[in-house]
Image: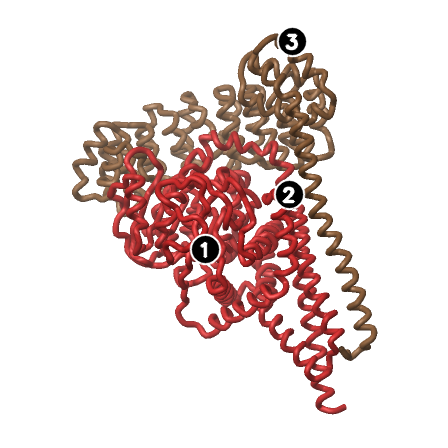
Amino acid sequence: MTALDVVSDVVVLANWFVLAYFLLLNTSYLGLILLAVREFRRHLRRRPYAGFEETYTDPLALGVSVVMPAHNEEATIVESVNAMLALRHPLFEVVVVDDGSTDGTFDVLRSHFGLVEVPRVVPEDVLTRGAITSVHAPPGAVPLVVVRKENGGKASANNTGINVSVQPLVCMVDADSLLDPDALLVVARPFGDDPEHVVATGGVVRAVNDSTVTAGRVTELRMPRTWLARTQVVEYLRAFLLGRSGWSALNALVVVSGAFGLFRRDVLVEVGGLDVDTIGEDAELVVRLHRWMREHRRRARVVFVPEPVAWTEVPESLRVLGRQRRRWSRGLAEVLWKHRRMLGNPAYGAVGTLALPFYALFELLAPVVELFGLVALAAGLLMGAVDWAFAVLFFLVAFGYGVALSLVALVVEEYSFHRYRGWRDLAVALVVAVVENVGYRQLTAVWRLRGLVDALRGGKAEWGRMTRVGFASAEPAGGPVPASGPVAHPGEVVPDAR
Amino acid sequence: MTSPVSPSIDRDVLVVAVGCLAVLLVALSLAVLAGRWWLRVTDARRAGLVASARPWLVRLVAGEDDDAVSVERLAAVDARTWRALEPVAVAMLGKVRGEARTAVVGLLERRGSVERAMRGAHRRSAVVRARSAHLLGAVGGPGATAQLARLLGDRDLEVRAVAVRALGRLADPSAAVALVHGLRRTPPLPHHLVMTALRQIGPAAVPPLLAAADHADDLVRAQVAEALGLIGAVAAAPVLVAMLRTDRSTEVRLRAVRALGLIGAPTPVDDVIAATSAREPLVLRVTAAEALGVLGARRAVPVLTELVDDPVHWVAHTAAASLAAIRPDGVAALARVADRSGHAREALAAANARRPPATVRP
């Protein structure tokens, strides 16, 4: 056997390894989807007798502080705050933390709500970065507080919001997110059902691009116009809605989206709030919650609620999307490294033995294996160890399984929540389920790999800049809101929709 | 592609896999399309059925024309239409009172919905049992309370929760004993739902609550104290004072002091003031300071004024907020210390602007 033969065999084995890896990865996702189906079925069947109307009038309902960190959100902040204030819940307040905006974010809020500066002693329950410069409130009983502070980053702004919050539950939402009207009622429900154990709940995040928004409500949901955003709609459905529901069923949910998550305030204070030095602060917080609870011998549950929805704009340019994915990947690597003690450790339950190993093997390392597979295949073809017919079959199996997975996700969506009602939207989703596996997936693998390299190299994390498109609003509330089209205010807006 | 095993086998395996995947992809695509079609058809059919009978239901609820005609019409609709209409009728029950309610209940009884719910409460399916409990809670009537009380011990948590809500909605005093028994956590019930239900039942729930006031489980005693406060059981004040003074559990003492604030009886003010002492646990101090504000006890103003300077943020903050609630003495006290205390300035500004004070419940 010559050296070339040995190399050929190695290349062939590498290809088989890659194929097996992706079959295992997609099968894991399939398992999560099946668990999610069970959860959805239960959720949908309980709808008629869930008693949300009674909760709305229940004087014993747990109060919620909605924390909205905002940085250069002039374009949509008034509409977002109005939408938050119109949520259905018997007891809640909205805390906007203006994190050193350099545009007119605060000015539009002051003008619209008639804000006046108020004295406020804010406790230092959790660590923040950047001092509070002033606190404002509208006259009368509007449950709104606006805190101005020096720029310190999103995690720090959220921590300031936690300090200012006065309700037992803290809901963290992105300032550019829109919530369904019953969102707080439904997402707060698990805290009442199991008050001793539930410490956090996460809501689902979906793409709002090009849908019609009226008075802060999504009134007509449509598939986005760009293929990049359309692809993310299906991706969010498969990975976020179904994947996280599956993890929740296993009590191993480790990511609650920074765009829509609800936490017990006392527990947030106990664990020290969000880590201001981690770029994946939302995932890090949840992993730390699990860890802290286990290490203090307390049973904790983090629950994912598949409906209602937080709507957010997803990136519509490759540059912005690439930066977002790079940041997510780096954040994941940092979280896994920080909590490496939990990896595979049965002392941390399903989080340690299932979720974190899954994220390490199938989320963090997937781009490495995927790109390694492409190189191995190319090498095999060049060396003649792999023939073209076989390469085509190889691709068809690997990507066919990926397409099947996306289609399963669409089937589940269609038979459960079916948010997109138009036939055209459905046709687009079917096309996306196929084409996302060719090109888009490989591109995200490159970005994620770069994020991993960033994490290995260390150094200061960059949030980057993202251009805002704005909601397609039928009735702009509180001033002009740019409809889809040219960017009016390129701002520091990075929707972190994980 | 060559393989360490056998190239031909490898290729065959892949060809079969590709074939299977192709079939699967087509099947899944068809399933998506069929789902959409099925959804549209069933939605349209259901809407059509409801639309055909809804006007008669609206007339019945509105008391227009002759109710008997509407009832006869609705009683005569076919089973398919009634299946679509029944949830609409049950939902209406929560929004109407008096004769309209009686008319809808009569219709549900006549259509056999109540009888089906009584039977459904024994069915194997948890969904059917929960749905039946929901309907019984909406309709009430003979046997409903007993049936729902039985469901408090159901093996499914969801069914138990629906039964608790239903009993609260009925507010039947005879359910109080069963609900208080439910606090004992075997099997567990969502406590906040039980609290709400006991509050809805009101004074009739006080005797069984008092009977459980010395239960061995801390959590049971704590819930008893909370429920007594929510009901506003003035007669239970001595029991709550005893809990505040002597109970070994901070959680029980905390709920007792909060309940004393809600009840509003003047006699226990000294005990509540004593609970703000620096020797007491922090959560109890904060809750006691809050209770003094709820009580509106002028006698507490000097103590609360001192507490405004407490080094612990939430004690000082809550004391200031409570002073703002005690008009005019508390507000005057705040004005006196405003120059040295940020908490006082904040509470004073909120009081002057008639904003609710920013206090956090520990």
Figure coloring: by chain
Q: Residues within 10 Å of mark 3 (few under 14, many from 20)?
A: few
- Same chain for mark 1 and mark 2? The answer is yes
Amino acid of disc 1: Pro
Write down the colour of chain A: red
Amino acid at the residue labelled 3 = Ala
For the N terminus of chain B, the quadrant is bottom right
Q: Is residue B8 above or below residue A343?
A: below
Give residue B219's position: percent from left, percent from top: 50, 37
- Looking at the image, which is closer to me, A111 or A295? A111
| Mark 1–mark 3 distance (CA, rounded to whole Å) | 59 Å
Taking B68 as reference, is B308 left or right?
Answer: left
Q: Which residue is mark 1?
A: A495
Residue in the foreground of this view, choosing between B57 and A458: B57
Residue bearing mark 3: B68
Q: Measuring 67% from the left and 32% from the top, which residue is drawn there? A: B44
- x and y, in percent, of residue B150 in the image: 65, 27
- Residue found 52% across the figure and 53% down from its top: A297
Q: Earlier in the sequence, mark 1 or mark 2?
A: 2
* Residue A311 rendering spot, x and y as whole percentages: 49, 47
Quarter of image, res B260: top left
Amino acid identity at mark 2: Ser
What color is chain B drawn in?
Answer: brown
Q: Is B284 above or below relative to B60? A: below
The answer to whether tags 1 and 3 share a subunit is no
Q: Secondary structure at mark 2?
A: loop
Which element is circle 1 on? Answer: loop
